[in-house]
Image (cartoon, grey):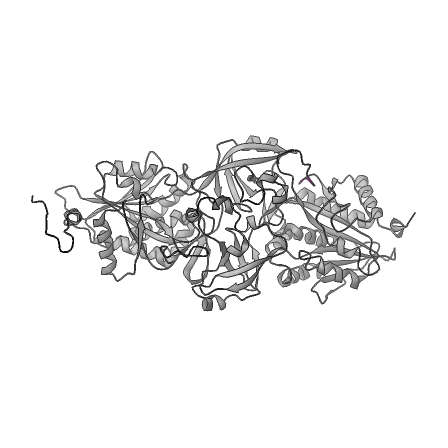
Amino acid sequence: MGMNDLLKQLTEVAGVSGDENDVRRLIRDLIVDHVDEWSVDTMGNLLATRRGTGQYDLRVLVDAHMDEVGLIVTDIDSSGMLSFVSIGGFDDRALLGKIVRVGPNGVVGVIGARAVHLLKAGEMSKVVRQDAMRIDIGARSKESAGGKVKVGDRAAFVTEYEELEGGRAAIGKAFDNRAGCAALIELLRGERYPFDIIAAFSVQEEVGLRGARVASAGVRPDVALVLECTPAYDQPKEGDVSSNVVMGKGVSVYVMDAGTIQDPRLVAHVMATADAHGIPYQVRQPGGGGTNTGAIQRAGAGIPAATLAVPGRYAHTPSLMISLDDYENMIRLADAVLRGLTPDTLRRE
Amino acid sequence: METFDLLKKLSEAPGPTGDERGIAAVVEEVWRPFVDQVIADRVGSLVGIKRGIGPDDRPRPSVLLAAHQDELGLMVTRIVEYQGSGFLRVINLGGVDRRQLMGQTAVVHGVRPLTGVLGTLPDAYLPPKKRGQSITWDELILDVGLPADQLRDLVSVGDFVTFRQSLRRLQNGRVTGKALDNRASLAAVTICLEQLQERRHSWDVIAVATAQEEETFLGAYTSAYSRRPDAAIVIDVSHAKGPGANDSDLAELGGGPILDIGVNVHPGLYKALCEAAGSIEMSIQTGVHGRASGTDAYAIQITGGGIPTGLVSIPLRYMHTMVETADLNDIERVGRLLAETIARMDDDFLPGIRDELMRPRNGEESNQAKD
């Protein structure tokens, strides 16, 4: 079987929150032949409509955020080194020694700090914080760096998409949430639904669900489905802490997180649909974290919403890992959930 | 070959300290056109010999160029199962900067090579006493995305793990990648051998890509013992100034070869390297070490009856990480300096460096022993 080209293209393109241009243009090209109309709103959300058969009078929003965590250049010092802060939650422990592409021209840089040999006793156990790190693009001075990059440029990580041997695992950057974007693109390319689907490839999820809030207020759907990649912490750990989700064990269905209690009617519909179709799923352990559902649910007069996610290990580092089974099952489940959706699904008993 | 392409080939080859077969094959390929003989020795070093045109009536003197070919790596210590998935615990081979590993990809060389991600839990999920600190080997895992039963069939405790990184260009002829310590030096030795094709040199040149420098200097001790050279020059990397490392005693990236003074270096070899640089008007930097240079010079100097040894270093940022950064100019200059130094070695060279040990201080009476 060939490599999943959609996941490869989507994970390798840059789109750090607030500068989603490259990923936005890529997605537009990937969907333009499959949607009836598309537009970009003032935030930068890419909105696309795929008309339905007209059987039901429903407007359904399907959201997948397209931004990713990354860095933004805050200063260029006299030796041409770039200071930065992170955009979106990023684990400082995962920054050192990584390669980034800076700015619209993708200038290659490395994140460096003092070499291990030069540390004083005790320094090895300390986490190097991002204010002590610099991006080194090989410039010799502020002037020579300034010709290539500028303050405010975003820096995205460089990890090539790769499907691992022997199993169904794939690694790459930004599966959070290009996995959701890829799934949404697959839905748009499928058969028409009984109602109109408005796809929102939303911006700025990683900095506070900001794009989805505006997108959903503008679209004013009757119901929303959010497609995500949720961190999987299913690694060996001390003591018995049950994992939130397990990679490879099915689509992660959200019930509750830090920002929402998901619409119980939709959650029931999702689970019943999965059971009926024999699609593996797991309830994401309720607790912290959040998705665009947190913004969509309380936009405008309120929008019933549910979230499906692909479990992704090593979230918010340059190299994530997902199971392609989970990814494909999310597409199947989202498709079945949408095809089974009727106005009755949302009727209050 | 363009220096970038040469270095890319060398840098990307696997050769963890203790299993240098991958890199040795690449070194053999790039050296073979420039040497008369290639020998893979019994402990993993690769030797290339280029004969000089010196006197036929007695054995030609020889200079050994040593650049270690091994790189940092990891080794599998345990296979751990969690909820059906298999994970590998690993330990360092050489002085790996473990602070840099999270989110890095690596290859475990099991029954067949398997790619995986080095990761750990978010800080908040670690036991309280481990939080707020850099990762230790206890928390780090290598995840190749396989169920535990499949993983056990493919990987064993003791398997080698190598890092993966393409060599990439930065601005101003600078490059970044893995194992530039010490593949940058292997590139410089290759450039030297190539330049010697066009130069007359009377001494034999014994180029050695040594094994296991990062742990024990094994290849340096053993190759110097077997080859018994009359002199040796070690080529390695040395810290360059960079972010968080602007100490005045560190070298400048792009500032040219670093010639070392210190206990592992014979003053005569230091002087010969300085004079060779002066003769081609090459700018150099001076490095200083105290008790030990941390290079193959430490071993070669005391092998057999002792070998006069010099040390040339290439400035390098972020040593022992996967983003080691060097300047191609420095590498080329080291190659040229080595060729120049070798071309200048003649019958007077050995007496000359011996005299250097008895040279009177300024203003002192000569107290030189008479023959």
Q: Position of residue B214 (x, y in %)?
A: 39, 41
Q: Position of residue B53 (x, y in %)?
A: 18, 48
Q: Nearer the viewer, residue A255 or B336?
A: A255
- Report the number of numbered marks: 0
Image height of A28 relative to A329, above or below: below
Image height of A12 relative to B28, above or below: below
The N terminus of chain A, quarter of image: top right
Residue B215 visible in the current orientation: yes
Residue positioned 46% across, 69% down in the render: A143
Q: Nearer the viewer, residue A319 or A275?
A: A319
Name of the residue lying farthest toward the left: B371
Q: Position of residue B96 (x, y in %)?
A: 46, 43
Name of the residue lying farthest toward the right: A349
Q: Is residue B106 left or right of residue A43?
A: left
Query: Residue A248 appears in which quarter of the rendering?
Result: top right
Image height of B143 relative to A54, above or below: above
Residue positioned 79% across, 42% down in the render: A274
Residue A188 visible in the current orientation: no
Q: Is residue B64 left or right of residue A91?
A: left
Residue positioned 60% across, 52% down in the render: A90
Q: Is residue B92 left or right of residue B250?
A: right
Is-magenta flag for residue B51? no
Which span is picked out in magenta?
A: A239-246
Q: Position of residue B283 (x, y in %)?
A: 29, 61
